[in-house]
Amino acid sequence: MAKQIPKSSSSNARVKVRVFEFEMDGSDDSIQDTMKTLAAAFSKGGTGTVPVTRRIRSDAAVVHQIDEAIDSSDELETDFAEDEHMIEDVVVRSASSPKKPRKAKTYEILNDIRFDSVSPTLPEFVAGFSPKNDFKKYLVIALWYKDHLKLAEINVRHWYTAFKYLKWTLPNDPDTPIRNLRALDKLSKGKEGGHSFINHIGEKDLEALSGG
């Protein structure tokens, strides 16, 4: 006669089951790595510290949701906020700080230049053109130097001194308009290093301003 197997007294033992669920939002790689991390933690019986995977560097939302899920279970212990070695790679990238404006270049003014020694003076001459941008201002000044001060070639200090005299706002880099006007063939390179002169194309460009 077959023996009856007595019921185990353990059938009446108390069993504690905890189930939780959470959502994750992030890239495929970060979610896969996160699931592997949780699986490894659960396989240890729910005890110990859950390691941080380095693949979730910028997914701050995922990290926050994992924290909430883990905090809801008494069996899981974590030191996310205390162990800075574990969380050092979980970084939210801040927007890059704005670049500091470039410091304006300055030059020594030319003390041997007089803008009121001839007629028309420089202020009178530029008033006949009313230049509105730096390119036109540079061309007008170059033409005055050439036609009335009889300087065929000038350098950046000549423009710098004229701008100062006229109380015009200088570009941060006073060399830039010179390079650009050369590229546009409205200024030509002078024989002396660093010097330029207005050519016939640049003079033609000013005719519309003067009404000529």
Image (tube, rainbow, N blue to C red):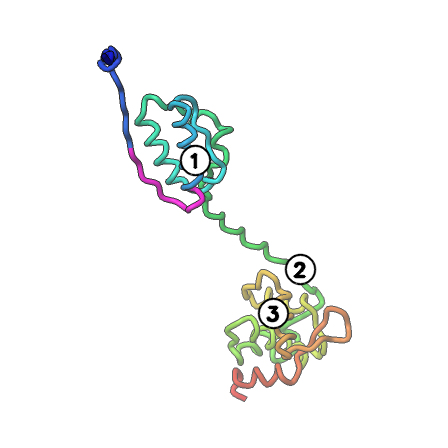
The numbered mark, 3 or 2, whose residue comes first in the sequence reads 2
Q: CA distance from mark 3 to mark 1?
A: 60 Å
Tag 1 and tag 2, C-beta contact below 8 Å: no
Residue beneath disc 2: 107
Residue beneath disc 1: 36
Residue placed most toward the observer, 17 or 2 = 2
Tag 3 and tag 1, C-beta contact below 8 Å: no
Q: Residues within 10 Å of mark 1 (few under 14, many from 20)?
A: few
What kind of element bears circle 3?
Answer: helix
The magenta stretch is: 21-30
Residue placed most toward the observer, 42 or 75 = 42
Q: Quadrant of the rendered structure where residue 67 is?
A: top left
Image coordinates for residue 84, horizontal then vertical, percent: 49, 28
The secondary structure making up most of the magenta span is loop
Q: Quadrant of the rendered structure where residue 206 is?
A: bottom right
What residue appears at the point 54 percent right and 64 percent down from the top-left corner? 169
